[in-house]
Image (cartoon, grey):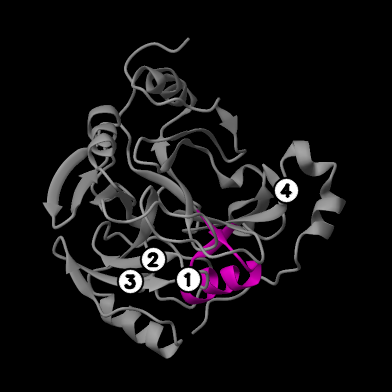
Amino acid sequence: MPAGPVPPIRGIHHITAVAGDAQANLDFHVGILGLRLVKSTVNFDDPATYHFYFADHAGSPGTVLTYFPHGPLRRHRPGTGEVSAIGLAIGEASIGWWIDRLRRLDIRHAAPVTRFDESVIALEDPDGTRLELIAGGAEAPIPVDAGSALPPAHAIRGFHSATLTVAAPGPTAHLLEAIMGMRAVSAEADRTRFVGAADAAAPGRTIDLRAAPDLPRARPGAGGVHHIAFRVPDDDALARWHQALPDAGHITTPIVDRRYFRSLYFREHGGVLFEFATDGPGFTRDEPLDALGSGLRLPEWLEARREAIERSLPAIARPQPRL
């Protein structure tokens, strides 16, 4: 049985959303956003569905945006109890470059706004998932995929933040601050900003908690976020959290093996599905770094069903970043 205090949460590990068409999802995130497909596998709980992982070159925690593309599916309805926006970090000097790129590629987007003294461009992926390009956060360039057409100076640098929208922010704020060890650092209009224990230059250390008491509960569907995962360093820390969270009033799943990390899940009191995930073992456990995302990878317990699984999945072509 693990002993000792739990470590404070560092920040975001990954965010997983629901998509419709698999090829459209690939084309947007690789072709438009210039992210690297670091893993193509299946939803371990539903092997007839792909699970795509997009990230920086190495699939570093804090940069990993993942999708379950289900095919034809009703659209998600925005509301409370969800991650309502995914913030992606770009450099301070990259706002104009990204506006020009989105216009040239005919990607609908909003004019930049200022939030917490940072410039924010809102846009949506093909399924309506709300994304925000935010000029702030880590300034060190993250390597992009070899052969990417995007200049490293303007490449997405992982997560900037995620916005959690809830009807009543008190219980979620208590979880973030008093239990997870994040710090409330500023407030503006209907949102409060929290930062995790990671270094200031680390991607994904920021959570914005937004109060929206007049909105209905979000309805799941294509374009919605399924869950947000937070970073814990290792298996020992995850075991400590597995013991501590029920004591704090949050009933979790057992610890599960997601092959590239180990996890537990729970739905926090505001309705958002949280996951705590280990930093390792990482995406190179079944593919070398230079070949990440090059083929369909299955866990050992599904490998015997490979032929049937591959027949059930739609054919896809790996896209290239668009110029």
Which residue is depicted at the point 67% across and 43% down? 44
Q: Is residue 93 above or below residue 250?
A: below
Q: Which residues are magenta?
A: 17-38
Asked if the magenta segment contains residue 25, the reply would be yes
Q: Looking at the picture, how far across and down is residue 135, in whole percent?
A: 25, 67
| Number of residues whose C-alpha sits closer than 10 Å to that of mark 3, classed few (under 14), some (14–19) or many (20 or more) | some
Binning the other alpha carbons within 10 Å of mark 2 as few (below 14), some (14 to 19) or many (20 upward) gives some
Q: Amino acid at mark 4?
A: Pro
The residue where tag 1 is placed is 125
Which label number is shown at residue 122?
A: 3
In the rendered structure, which disc, 3 or 4, sits on the residue that comes first in sequence? 4
- Image spot of residue 223 (x, y percent): 50, 63
Residue lying at 48% horizontally and 76% vertically, measured from the top left: 32
Residue 60 appears in view: no
- Among numbered discs 2 and 4, the one appearing first in the sequence: 4
Question: Which residue position holds label 4?
Answer: 47
Q: Say whether marks 3 and 4 touch (CB < 8 Å).
A: no
